[in-house]
């Protein structure tokens, strides 16, 4: 009797679950993976496009931008100008994995191993996800968010809700807490808390705004700068949080919409810091599982060749002078580092023992990987585990691009000094502190016209693009209700390099 789990490209649900059971055994007993319960949904190509458009989240509320993305992706897909992802996976408990019905059975096995076990393990065990996300509550919260937005559209009008969501979406990257708060919110209780917040707002009176006149020319009671900033809890880097809590003009339903967008932005915050590790983990897991399936005769040579063709496409890294080059492929970069960790653990060279004395030759590469997946994010992972062997294998080098010089200069190559410099440079490229601008609300002009004052701390002379800065500032002014001013300040000497301002357009009517 044949031990093959399947033959050919066709699949049915019995074959799918039989394959899942074998993959589950390999993943949990041999690789030591610890996962959330799995929920696997089979969807069509059109449904996959729809999931793309709503940032990959089920039960997402409606917004015009999702439809725009769907129309673009659908057009490109039908013209053959782009393909579709084999899967989408949701960080929730149960972990929801969407797989396309058009996939062959070999690809279904790959995406189950990749998403339902690789990504799933990473979501459950990485410290950033454990600290910042509520996997058990996110689906219930999205259900609440979808119904709440629909109720707001019925009560306050589609246009008013859309304007508020447009402004909130423009600020999503600046709507997260980057330092831990006392306790993760239980997202499953948000509907009840929304009613409690509404009742609380009706019972309190904000003394801060009582002292501010409604007409210009009538000065409020003066407050010392330190007292004012203490009262407003400034400076504040989470712009959406500040506007939700402190805006003098927003209605309660608008504050709740900002809160919804802020929670969703916070949900994605760990994913932005672990793209390399997350995809590398899932790719390493699916490669190991598919290899074991082949070694034990569960899949045919033809299925293994189909897998290797798909895997090679996913991990393909164009050379720097290739027209297709757009940076390092996180699937390839992460996979290469993680495979190298296993090599160093099993068969280290003298160079490996010098660079990685803590685990070289330990004999259990998967234990090292599980610890790394738990404790690190992309920046620190690269600093800790990128080896000279991988730098040579991927032919990495560092180039200095000085705007004042007519040519590029190769600064670091494959030598002792170069390995460390390349590793540090790549780690910085994955550090959000260097990728996203540091913009904070620093003050409110309570003695004048209620202007909201923001600072952008400029590093290495990287100013904001003026048109985009003013466009986003208009959204801030709209949510604040008064003028917003953004000062770009040199981090080196506190000099003001550029100033942007925007006046508030009319807010949505209640």
Image: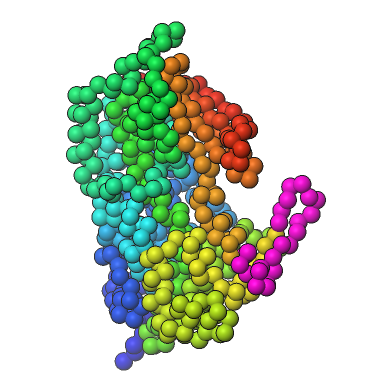
| Picture quadrant of residue 421 | bottom right
Count of numbered badges drawn on the protein: 0
Percent position of residue 362, x then y: 43, 83
- Residue farthest to the bottom, as pictured: 1
Quadrant where the image shows the N terminus: bottom left
Residue 308 seen in the current view: no
Q: Is residue 206 left or right of residue 386?
A: left
| Closest to the observer, 348 or 84 | 348
Is 408 contained in the magenta span? yes
Q: Is residue 8 above or below residue 447?
A: below
> Residue placed at 71% from the left, 62% from the top?
411
Q: Is residue 451 above or below residue 88?
A: above
Q: Is residue 9 above or below residue 41?
A: below
Q: Is residue 306 left or right of residue 58?
A: right
Q: Which residues are magenta?
A: 400-422
Percent position of residue 229, x then y: 40, 29
> Residue placed at 40% from the left, 50% from the top?
268
């Amino acid at each position: 009797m044949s031990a093959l789990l399947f033959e050919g490209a066709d699949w049915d649900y019995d074959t799918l679950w039989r394959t899942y059971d074998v993959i589950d055994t390999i993943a949990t007993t041999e690789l030591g993976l610890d996962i959330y319960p799995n929920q696997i949904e089979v969807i069509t190509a059109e449904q996959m496009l729809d999931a793309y458009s709503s940032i990959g989240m089920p039960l997402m509320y409606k917004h015009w931008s999702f439809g725009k993305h769907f129309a673009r992706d659908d057009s490109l897909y039908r013209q053959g100008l782009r393909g579709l992802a084999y899967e989408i996976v949701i960080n929730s408990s149960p972990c929801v994995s969407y797989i396309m019905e058009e996939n062959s059975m070999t690809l279904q096995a790959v995406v189950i191993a990749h998403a339902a076990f690789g990504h799933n393990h990473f979501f459950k065990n990485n410290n950033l996800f454990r600290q910042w996300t509520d996997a058990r509550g996110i689906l219930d919260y999205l259900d609440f968010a979808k119904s709440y937005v629909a109720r707001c559209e019925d009560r306050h009008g589609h246009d008013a809700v859309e304007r508020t969501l447009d402004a909130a979406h423009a600020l999503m990257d600046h709507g997260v807490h980057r330092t831990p708060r006392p306790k993760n919110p239980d997202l499953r209780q948000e509907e009840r808390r929304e009613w409690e917040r509404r009742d609380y707002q009706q019972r309190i009176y904000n003394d801060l705004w009582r002292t501010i006149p409604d007409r210009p020319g009538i000065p409020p009671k003066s407050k010392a700068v330190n007292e004012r900033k203490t009262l407003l809890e400034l400076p504040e880097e989470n712009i959406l949080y500040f506007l939700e809590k402190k805006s003098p003009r927003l209605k309660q339903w608008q504050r709740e919409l900002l809160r919804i967008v802020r929670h969703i932005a916070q949900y994605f915050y760990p994913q932005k810091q672990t793209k390399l590790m997350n995809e590398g983990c899932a790719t390493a897991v699916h490669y190991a599982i598919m290899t074991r399936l082949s070694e034990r005769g569960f899949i045919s040579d033809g299925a293994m060749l189909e897998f290797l063709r798909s895997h090679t496409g996913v991990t393909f890294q164009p050379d720097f002078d290739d027209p297709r080059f757009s940076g390092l492929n996180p699937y390839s970069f992460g996979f290469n580092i993680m495979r190298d960790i296993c090599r160093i653990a099993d068969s280290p060279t003298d160079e490996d023992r010098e660079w990685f004395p803590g685990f070289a030759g330990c004999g259990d590469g998967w234990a090292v990987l599980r610890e790394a997946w738990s404790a690190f994010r992309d920046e620190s992972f690269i600093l800790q585990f990128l080896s000279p062997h991988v730098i040579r294998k991927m032919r990495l080098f560092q180039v200095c691009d000085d705007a004042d010089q007519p040519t590029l200069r190769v600064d670091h190559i494959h030598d002792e000094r170069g390995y460390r410099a390349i590793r540090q440079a790549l780690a910085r490229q994955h550090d959000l502190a260097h990728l996203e601008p540091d913009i904070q609300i620093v003050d409110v002009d309570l003695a004048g016209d209620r202007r909201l004052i923001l600072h952008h701390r400029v590093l290495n002379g990287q100013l904001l693009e003026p048109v985009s800065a003013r466009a986003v500032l208009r959204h801030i002014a709209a949510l604040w209700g008064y003028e917003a001013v953004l000062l770009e300040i040199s981090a080196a000497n506190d000099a003001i390099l550029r100033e942007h301002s925007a006046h508030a357009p009319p807010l949505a009517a209640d």
